[in-house]
Image (spheres, helix red, strand yellow):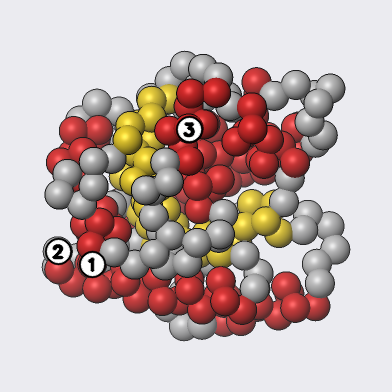
Amino acid sequence: MPVISFASCKGGSGKSTSALVLACELAEGADVILIDADPHQPLVAWSTMAPPPARLSVVSSKGEREIQDEIDVAARKAPFVIVDLEGMASQLATFAMSESDLVLVPAQEQHQDAQAAVDTLGAVKRAGRTGRRDIPAAVLLTRTKAAVKSRTARFIAAQLRGIEGVRVMNVELNERDAFSALFSSGGGLRQLDPNEVRGIDKAILNAVAFAREVVALLKEARK
């Protein structure tokens, strides 16, 4: 079963939000196990606020000595396994990436995030060499403006897309109140109260497009 890891050697890239949005959307049609391997356990905390989507389970990782076994067990139970890694380079991240069918590298349209994304892709390649295989990976632009982007944002995005060997997803995860609200209310996008959170419908459309491209990347990798 596909294992998707969210990795970045820099914190604050939107990694946990991206992992949660994807997990909730995939859980609309399949069983999903979300492994929280971030020491701060943001997704475990999210799961205690309100009931998660019915087909989504959240597991707390016990660390680098257990992560590969945890992924293996989860992959035997659910069609999709999503791993949220800590926002730094680590042995745990290397172990998880080596078990992954796809590694997504979230990055904001900022210079530091772009450099961290390139560095993380390098770590993915090194993890692949350990297992003597190529691990599919792509950069996911996060917290992007849905309408007008700044000149700097456009420049950073163009730079990333222009680097040989770097794949950037077509779908971007836009900056939406609904995505942020997940961590304050729990549940999925469809459980948010439209009287309290703006733009839920647009956030759902963004999540659907994101999930569809991830599935397409997985199918492409299998071919």
How dense is the environment of label 1, judged by Cα within 10 Å: few (below 14), some, or many (20 and up)? many
Image point (37%, 52%), residue name: 85
Labels 3 and 1 touching (C-beta < 8 A): no
Q: Which residue is more in the foreground, 168 or 37? A: 37
Q: Amino acid at mark 3?
A: Ala
The quarter of the picture where the C terminus appears is bottom left
Return the mark for residue 45.
Answer: 3
Return the mark for residue 127.
Answer: 1
Return the mark for residue 12.
Answer: none
Residue 36 visible within the image: yes
Q: Amino acid at mark 2?
A: Gly
Image point (30%, 52%), residue name: 101
Vertically, is 73 above or below 7? above
Labels 2 and 1 touching (C-beta < 8 A): yes
How dense is the environment of label 2, judged by Cα within 10 Å: few (below 14), some, or many (20 and up)? few
Q: Mark 2 highlights which residue?
A: 131
CA–CA distance in space, label 3 to label 1:
29 Å
Mark 1 element type: helix
Mark 2 element type: loop
Image point (48%, 71%), residue name: 117
Vertically, is 217 above or below 116? above
